[in-house]
Structure formats: structure tokens, C-alpha cells
Image: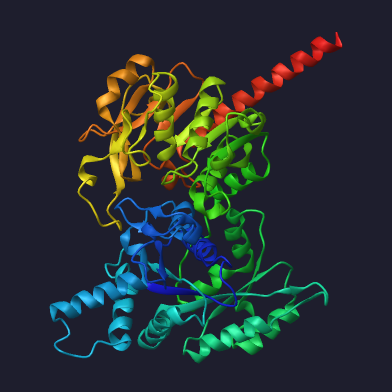
Amino acid sequence: MTKYIFVTGGVTSSLGKGIIAASLAKLLQARGLKVTIQKFDPYINVDPGTLNPYEHGECFVTDDGAETDLDLGHYERFLNIPTSQANNVTTGRIYQTVINKEREGAYLGKTVQVIPHITDEIKRRMLLLGSDGKYDIVITEIGGTVGDIESLPFVEAVRQLQWEMPEEDCMVVHLTLIPYLKAAKELKTKPTQHSVRMLSQEGVHPNVIVCRTEHPLSDELKKKIALFCNVKTNAVIEAMDASTIYEVPMKMLQEGLDIIVLTKLQINGYAAPELTKWRAFLDKLKYPQSKVTIGLIGKYIELQDAYKSILESFIHAGAINECKVQIVNVHSEFITDENVKEKFKDLDGLLVAPGFGLRGVEGKIIAVKYARENNLPFFGICLGMQMAVIEFARNVLGWTDSHSTEMNENTTHPVIDLMEDQKSIEMKGGTMRLGAFPCDIVEGTLAHTIYGTTHISERHRHRWEFNNKYIKDFEKAGMVPSGKNPGSGLVEIVELPNHPFFIGVQYHPELKSTVENPQPIFIHFIKAAKAFAEKKETAKTSILQSELS
């Protein structure tokens, strides 16, 4: 029988429900249990695909082409297993399903209501992943905070499941905040008490309370929280701020969160946690042997969650290389020919990030040109790859008006053009080229060195592509299309052989990077950046010695 854990949040958003859920899942997985996590989001959008990154952070894409919440990225990075469409459900998707069934006459003339029809659909989705016995435990993160109007149907569904299921098959973990008042030099438990009381008023009684805090919780404070929130003292878990999210599983292990969960769910015979690889990763992460500085060129840099998977991929690749990766955010809108040298003088590598629309595009093209001409390691993702193609067309092939038809429909050299099967699409939601697609790699290329194989599969999210009409011109001038989709001929990878490291990819490699399997391009990019930094340092030392002599 599959067991179910529900993770709710109170007091404030952004406390880290996704990280706590993923950390708990990691500990249970490390004990030999089969675990998965799903996210239920209360907003009415069907998925995050049409949301601006400033609204919701990055849009994470699964192998099966689902556009999902960025927390699914954390789930994959921690558990090292892929998620799917079934792992992310929104209010919009719930209502869409119920309304479609009503239109079909599925409710036999009954009045369709939030209870029971909406809550029944929520419950069906909550139990779906566990219905085939594939998992021992399904963890469900409920988005938003307790008390939000839009979250009420989800909380009610949890209440019903708590009532319907045997006590040992279902439990609730509530994440809350213990604020520290600097003036009083005191941690305050009242917000947590109110949050739990509000949850209890909705009929949901938490079994475990995880307390986010900047300072350690004393035994006295834990007893107070336990008393007022009606849980056992050992079920009050301290979640101190950590230097990295990857430390959180170890902190939860110290607090005994997994043991409390296993006891409540009456799961016996579990093994000791096997976390050897995780500890080795943390050691490399905490004690790097070198450092590189990478410029992240984007237009959503004000919100770090807009590039969450990229930043985490750098952490994974940095640890493998025993190298601290320092990210310098550079807003592409403010890059010009006049200031580019000053902005990039201290960089060891350059990543041009994905995005949509005209804003900031010219700055990205200038950045690519600088990297190409100065042998600075370059990595372009999706739009970043397209900018590399446009820059090469303008400044090497001499087609000065080259562009993408996304930004300029009237260009005489549309080196990036709308994919043929996208030209008739008018609906924006869920209609891009989405999910995992195969790619064949040419032997002897940089891409082949990176992947060590000629056949890969990577995840996509785009509408525009390299225009194959110009492929011969690019090859003649020195840009190699080293990876193509075997069915459509779509160019997936471009590179410059006469450059120390210059590669652009149409797909999103960052989406598949995990702690245990870092993404190969990021690993090799950091390796190239290390070589660049060492060469730069050697040159500086040589100049200094020359001056001294």
C-alpha cells in the first residue's frame, strides 16, 4: 500500500517547502524506499508555460513535454529520477478537467460544485502516482500558504484524505516560520501557533512541524511549539538556514525527520541511509581547490529563480571539477560595444542564457562576439545558441542584417526562423517544441568529446530554429553543426573548432543536471574556464616577473 505525505506551508511564502519535501524524499530514498514528489499549485493558469519568469521563476520542462513549476527541478536534482506531467497539477488544470467532464455530461445533470466535484478531482490526482504500486511513498507539496483563498480546495482535499485513509497511510508535514526579533533578541513562536491553528480550523491536523529559523531552537521552545500545536516534541523539527540547499537533507537527518515519518507511517525494516555520494558531493562543494568567474548574460537577472536550473547545474559541475563557480550576472540590455571589454575583463567564461523577445538581444550578440574574438569559453543555451548563429552571420559571413524572424520578420537573412510546424499555431499555451528529443552527434567534434557518444536525448522548449537554408554557408565559414535531430534535421548543436571552447545548443541541458549526474556540457565548460583562468594567471605572473627583472 502506497503511503502519502502532504507538505503544507504557513506564515509566509518562499520558506522552502520544495526543498524540505525533496530533502525528506532523499532521506527516505536513501533508506531503500521508492519515493516520488508532486506539486499542487493553486494558481488558475493551466501551467507556468505562459508566465513571465518575473512572475514565477523558470518554467521547468519534463521528458514528456510538461511545462511545470521550478520545484520539480529540485525534485529531480535531489532524487536523480525524472518527473512527468503527473507530478505538477494546478487549479487551472483541475477546473479544466471538471468543466470538460461537465460539458460531456459526465455528472448526469447534477449541480457541479467545489465540494465534491473539484475536491474529488484533486484527490484523484493526488492519489494517481501511487495507484499502480510503483512507489512506496508519494510526497505532495501544496503550493501557497494556509489561509490563501485559492488554496482552500487543496487543503479540504487533504482533510478528506486524512479522514478517509488509515492513520498509518497518510500524514501532514507543516512548514512554518519562527521569526527572530532583533530588538528583543528573541525567537517568536506566535506566527507558527496561528498558522497551525488556521490549518486545524480547516480540519487538517499536522503530524510534524518544520520550523524555518535563523537561530537554533532551544528544547524549551520546541516543547512550547509542541504543546500549543498539539504534536509530540520530537515532531518539532528545526530547519536552520543552510549555506547550500544540498545541506538540508543532512540537517533533516540530524533532526530525525525521516525516522519520525517512518514511525508514523508504520514502515519497518528500512535500511540505514546510504548517502556516500551525497556526502562526497558536499565535501567537494564546500572545499573547492580553485575558482572561476562566469558571466551569466540574461535579461531576467533581477530574479535568480528565472535561471534556477542553470545556477544549480553550475554548482553540480563546479563540485565535479572541485572548483568554486562564482556567477556574475550581466544584464544584456546594458551591454554595448563601448563597455563590453570593461564588463567582461575579469570573466573566465561566458554563458548566454535562454529567453524570448527582442529586449536585450543586441547585448547578447555583442557578448557572443566578444567571447568569439577573445577566445573566452562560450556556452549558449536555446536563445543563446541562436544569438551565436546571428553574430557569426553578421560578423563572419558579412550578412549585417541577419536576425531571427522572432525579432525581425523583414530581415533578408533569417538565419533563425520559425519552425515549420509552428507557423500555423495560434494558441500560445503548451504548443512549443516541448520535452525530450533525440540528437545525433558528429564524431570528432567538441560535442562528441563532451558526451562521449553519438546519440543523446535532451529537453527542448522553443519555437524558432536554425534555418537549414544557410547551413552550407556556415559550414564553409567554419561553424560546425555538430548535432542534429535524426528525424527533422533540426540543428541542435553548433560549435567553432578553432576556438578553445565555443558551443551553442538549441535544447536546455540544465534541465537534466542532478547531484549524482551533472550535465556534461557544464562540466566541460567549467573545465575550459579553469584552463582559461590558469592561462590568464600564468600570463600575469610572467609579466610581473618580467617587470621585476
> Which residue is at the far top?
549
Which residue is situated farthest in the right direction here?
Answer: 548
Residue 52 appears in the rendering = yes
Q: Is residue 101 above or below residue 249?
A: below
Total of numbered circles in the picture? Answer: 0
Classify 530 as above or below 162.
above
State left or right for residue 220 relative to residue 166: right
Establish if 60 lies above or below 141: above
Residue 297 image point, x, y percent: 54, 39
Q: Name the quadrant containing residue 400.
A: top left
Q: Quadrant of the N terminus?
A: bottom left
Q: Position of residue 3 (x, y in %)?
A: 39, 73
The residue under the point 31% across, 81% down is 118
Q: Residue at x 43, y 51 (%)?
A: 80
Instruction: Please name the colour scheme applied to the rendered image.
Output: rainbow
Residue 454 visible in the displayed image: no
- Residue 346 or 135: which is nearer the viewer? 346
Which residue is located at x 83 percent, y 75 percent? Answer: 183
Of residues 422 and 362, the one drawn nearer to the viewer in this rendering? 362
> In x, y percent, where is residue 520?
45, 35
The image position of residue 55, as x and y in percent, is 48, 61
Comparing 206 with 368, the one in front is 368
Q: Quadrant of the C terminus?
A: top right
User: In the visual, does 326 lie left or right of 164?
Assistant: right
Give left or right: position of 382 versus 271: left
Residue farthest toward the front in the current orientation of the protein: 410
